[in-house]
Image (tube, rainbow, N blue to C red):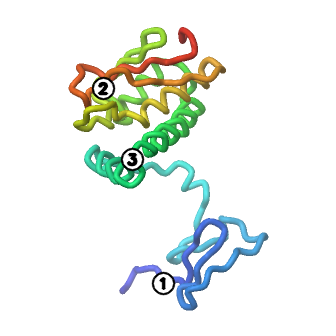
Amino acid sequence: MPGRAAPIHCRCIWRSYQDTQTKKYKSLPQDIAWTKIVLRGELLNPEAFAERIIKIRHDELVATKRLYETVMTFAAHGLFYRAGRLIGERIAKTIGTELEDLKAYLIEEGWVLDIDFEGDTVIVKGSIEIDESDMPTCHILRGLLSKFFEEKIGRDVYSHERNCQSKKDEYCVFSLDSGVIE
């Protein structure tokens, strides 16, 4: 087809590649930088991947979480919490630790419809993680808040979701355990 990049005979996977003809995985030589790897006829630039953002729909997130929960049961909640901590750390390093900046970011990025901070309590309306349940479901947001506040105050912070809209509560309410957050 005209204008289509010529196919290549390898798929890059981290620091190795699979030769699509022999189906064997091979390590990349140490002197090959990521910038020298070609995919579909184009030179890859690792910096381009650092800032890529995907959007996931609410129903896709809920379905993914349900899948993990069917396989891992309650252990999945810890996995989501840890994933949220990674996200919270990135957010704190990207926007800083001002609460108004966090509020604007979480609303703009679709994590929540609204969020308020009252000392060691966080009140959320419309978390992206809401799903009909008899227990709290906002584990990613819980981890995100925990790590963000750790970065803010320099101490360990644990976040507990006391109320959740998934349980038909009016708001999701998170308690931050590490003393009063200033």
Which is closer to the viewer, label 1 or label 3?
3
Q: Earlier in the sequence, mark 1 or mark 2?
A: 1
Q: Is residue 67 above or below residue 90?
A: below
The residue sitting at 34% across, 52% down in the picture is 70
Q: Quadrant of the N terminus?
A: bottom left
View extreme (front): residue: 73
Decide if residue 107 is in sight here. yes
Q: Nearer the viewer, residue 53 or 60?
A: 60
View extreme (right): residue: 31
Residue ID for mark 3: 73
Callout 1 touching callout 3 (CB < 8 Å): no
Q: Earlier in the sequence, mark 2 or mark 3?
A: 3
Question: Type of residue at label 2?
Answer: Cys
Helix, strand or loop at label 1? It is loop
Q: Is residue 132 above or below residue 2?
A: above
Decide if residue 182 is in sight here. no
Position of 82 compared to 166: left or right?
right
Distance between the Cα atoms at labels 1 and 3? 45 Å
Which is closer to the viewer, label 1 or label 2?
2
Residue 129, position in %: x, y?
33, 37
Quarter assignment of residue 112: top left
Q: Quadrant of the C terminus?
A: top right
Distance between the Cα atoms at labels 1 and 2? 52 Å
Helix, strand or loop at label 2? It is loop
Q: Residues within 10 Å of mark 1 (few under 14, many from 20)?
A: few
Residue ID for mark 2: 164
Residue ID for mark 1: 6
Callout 2 touching callout 3 (CB < 8 Å): no
Residue 179, position in %: x, y?
56, 10
